[in-house]
Image (cartoon, rainbow, N blue to C red):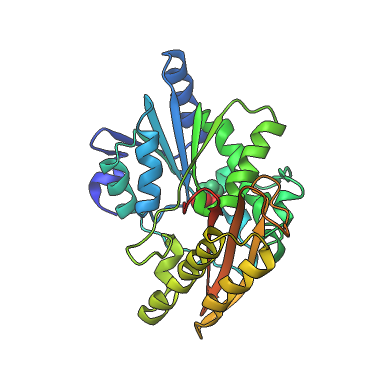
């Protein structure tokens, strides 16, 4: 690691690794009447994260966490190989005006004997929860912990992970957590592929193939825009586009209620069109809200 990163600061940005130190920082900022915005991340930052940081910079103090959360990965998933590049992340964070990078050790967040989990029922078992049964419990648990440590006024999440965004909103409501949850629209590559740290896994051919998800979603929007409201018909059109790509294997393509994430047959006003698709060995997700424009 470069020397300037070891010292714990990059220009004015501070890097905090300890929970006590992080809580201490937030307590003093709050005492001074400052508002704290928080962007939780697993690192390997891209333009999608930068759009969250841009929103966070509107507040007095901007905290970003980098923590690859072991408990949101299944045992057959990519925790060990999840892309990591601390040097690049710290540079992006500093350039985006982050005040504090909170980068705790897994052993301090989940010490021996850790027993408590946060489970947001129903919402966590739909869509991605079917093929990733403990994923959202892992997300809700770590986010609840990070909220208690960082003590922000506002927390900012990307809506590419729409289900995660809805689950966190439900969690703060149910647990009376006084943090405003802000959602930021999906950021896309020029050819439409939703930005994701996992895009790094794609070979050049898969990278091109991956655009089938966006093309499928666009097809869904077009069919909706010309007046179709029967979700079976819209979904068939979306699947046709995605499945026309030989390396794509659909995990799910669904149209559901925006707040309950329950599947619906006929769209009244708006609905979430969400997809998870394997491109080779990489599982990618994407979505849009029908009736509100592409996010
Ligand atoms: O969206 C992510 O990167 C993660 O799920 C989060 C919210 C940082 C929790 O680990």
Q: From the viewer's perspective, is residue 265 above or below residue 97?
A: below
Q: Residue at x 60, y 25 (%)?
A: 178
On the image, the x and y values in percent for residue 122 come to 76, 50
Q: From the viewer's perspective, is residue 3 above or below residue 203?
A: above
Locate the N terminus and report the quarter of the image it occupies.
bottom left
Number of dots carrying numbers: 0
Q: Residue at x 55, y 74 (%)?
A: 278
Residue nearest the viewer, comparing 28 with 241:
241
Residue nearest the viewer, comparing 236 with 97:
236
- In the picture as drawn, the residue positioned furthest to the bottom comes out as 246
Q: In the drawing, does residue 97 fall left or right of residue 71?
A: left
- In the picture as drawn, the residue positioned furthest to the top comes out as 32
On the image, the x and y values in percent for residue 232 come to 69, 68
Q: In the drawing, does residue 28 fall left or right of residue 50?
A: right
Q: From the viewer's perspective, is residue 152 above or below residue 237?
A: above
- In the picture as drawn, the residue positioned furthest to the right comes out as 122
On the image, the x and y values in percent for residue 143 come to 58, 41
Q: Which residue is drawn at 64% across and 28% down?
A: 177
On the image, the x and y values in percent for residue 38 come to 46, 35
Q: Residue at x 71, y 63 (%)?
A: 130
Quadrant housing residue 111 = top right
Instruction: Specify whether residue 278 is in view.
Output: yes
Q: From the viewer's perspective, is residue 278 above or below residue 173?
A: below
Instruction: Specify whether residue 252 is in view.
Output: no
Q: In the drawing, does residue 35 fall left or right of residue 261?
A: left
Q: In the drawing, does residue 212 fall left or right of residue 61?
A: right
């Amino acid at each position: 690691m470069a020397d300037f990163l070891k010292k714990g600061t990059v220009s004015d940005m501070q890097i905090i690794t300890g929970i006590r130190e992080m809580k201490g920082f937030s307590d003093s900022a709050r005492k001074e009447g400052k508002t704290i915005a928080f962007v939780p991340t697993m690192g390997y930052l891209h333009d999608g994260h930068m759009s969250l940081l841009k929103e966070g910079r509107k507040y007095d103090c901007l905290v970003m966490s980098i923590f690859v959360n072991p408990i949101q990965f299944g045992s057959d998933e990519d925790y060990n190989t999840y892309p990591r590049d601390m040097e690049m992340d710290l540079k992006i964070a500093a350039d985006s005006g982050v005040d504090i990078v909170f980068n705790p050790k897994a052993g301090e967040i989940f010490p021996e004997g850790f027993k408590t989990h946060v489970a947001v029922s129903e919402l966590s078992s739909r869509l991605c929860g079917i093929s990733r049964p403990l994923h959202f419990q892992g997300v809700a648990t770590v986010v609840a912990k990070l909220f208690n440590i960082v003590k922000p006024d506002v927390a900012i999440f990307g809506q590419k992970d729409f289900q995660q965004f809805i689950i966190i909103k439900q969690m703060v409501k149910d647990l009376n957590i006084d943090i405003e949850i802000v959602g930021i629209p999906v950021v896309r590559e020029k050819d439409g592929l939703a930005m994701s740290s996992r895009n790094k896994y794609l070979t050049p051919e898969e990278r091109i193939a991956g655009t089938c998800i966006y093309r499928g979603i666009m097809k869904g929007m077009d069919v909706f825009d010309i007046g179709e409201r029967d979700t079976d018909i819209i979904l068939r059109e979306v699947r046709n586009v995605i499945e026309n790509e030989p390396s794509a294997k659909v995990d799910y393509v669904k149209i559901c209620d925006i707040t309950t994430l329950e599947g619906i047959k006929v769209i009244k006003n708006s609905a979430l069109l969400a997809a998870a698709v394997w491109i080779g060995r990489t599982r990618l997700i994407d979505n849009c809200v029908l009736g509100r424009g592409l996010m």
